Amino acid sequence: MDRLPTGISVLDRELGGGIPSGSIVVLTAQPASQAELFLYELTAARGTLYLTTIRSEEAVRDGLDRTTTRIGSPTIRDIGGDTALDLDHANDLIGTLPEEANLIIDAVDPLERHETSRYRRFLNSLQTHMINTGSVAVIHAMKGQTIPDNRDLTEHVADVVFDLHTEITTNEVVNRLAVPKFRGGVALEEPVKLKLAESVTIDTSRDIA
């Protein structure tokens, strides 16, 4: 199966070269985390359509401009996400995605709050377009205080699930990435400890019990 590099070298090494083309990837993370660093680095790998549902286009662009990691030049579109028409708007934009491109949805939470049958049709249409174009969709799903009812649907349809866990101790902020699901590949047997500072790197420090 053809694999598309994520552009994040630490992930590509762990995943045997990248993500199978045509995949939907869900990145779950707490709102107060460095999850956006993943999304920003993904834009460096290939042409990217960045759909934002919460922050404005200007806010996303400013975040990209201020980051110190390697990035690309994504096309950014604000799709809102709160009204029924926003799913149609997202579908229209996704339909313009060329072959072997990246799609980022940041964040999917507002879309998940739509009626289940409409949201399911949206996911199925997304999956079909990813397969037809050999592209990769990365969906940012927040693990906040209120998780939308359709989150199970999102994770079930996804081919790959990245689960970023951020723990704050008295001495440090610890980030661990688990990959509990990898359709068409091998899920990681244990979480990877990461450093999320200027870029995404492996944290080689030892945990002291």
Image (cartoon, rainbow, N blue to C red):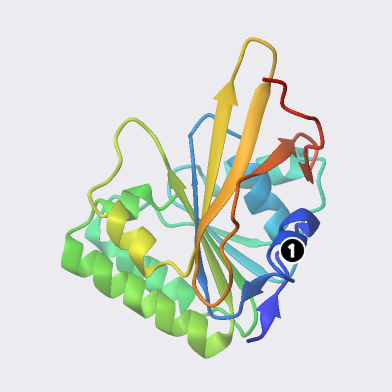
The residue type indicated by label 1 comes to: Asp
> Looking at this rendering, what residue extends furthest in the bottom direction?
132
Q: Residues within 10 Å of mark 1 (few under 14, many from 20)?
A: some
Residue 43 appearing in the image: no
Q: Which quarter of the image is occupied by the N terminus?
A: bottom right
> Looking at this rendering, what residue extends furthest in the top direction?
170
Q: In which quarter of the image is residue 156?
A: bottom left
Residue at 36% in and 48% down: 109
Question: Considering only vertical position in the picture, is 22 above or below 170?
Answer: below
Q: Classify residue 179 as left or right of residue 46.
A: left
Q: Where is residue 135 in the image (x, y as percent from the top left)?
A: 59, 78
Residue 31 appearing in the image: yes
Residue located beneath label 1 in the image: 12
Residue at 43% in and 50% down: 53
Residue at 76% in and 34% down: 197
Q: Quadrant of residue 194?
A: top right
Q: Classify residue 148 as left or right of residue 116.
A: right
Q: Which quarter of the image is occupied by the C terminus?
A: top right
Disc 1 secondary structure class: helix
Q: Classify residue 191 as left or right of residue 9.
A: left
Residue at 47% in and 70% down: 159
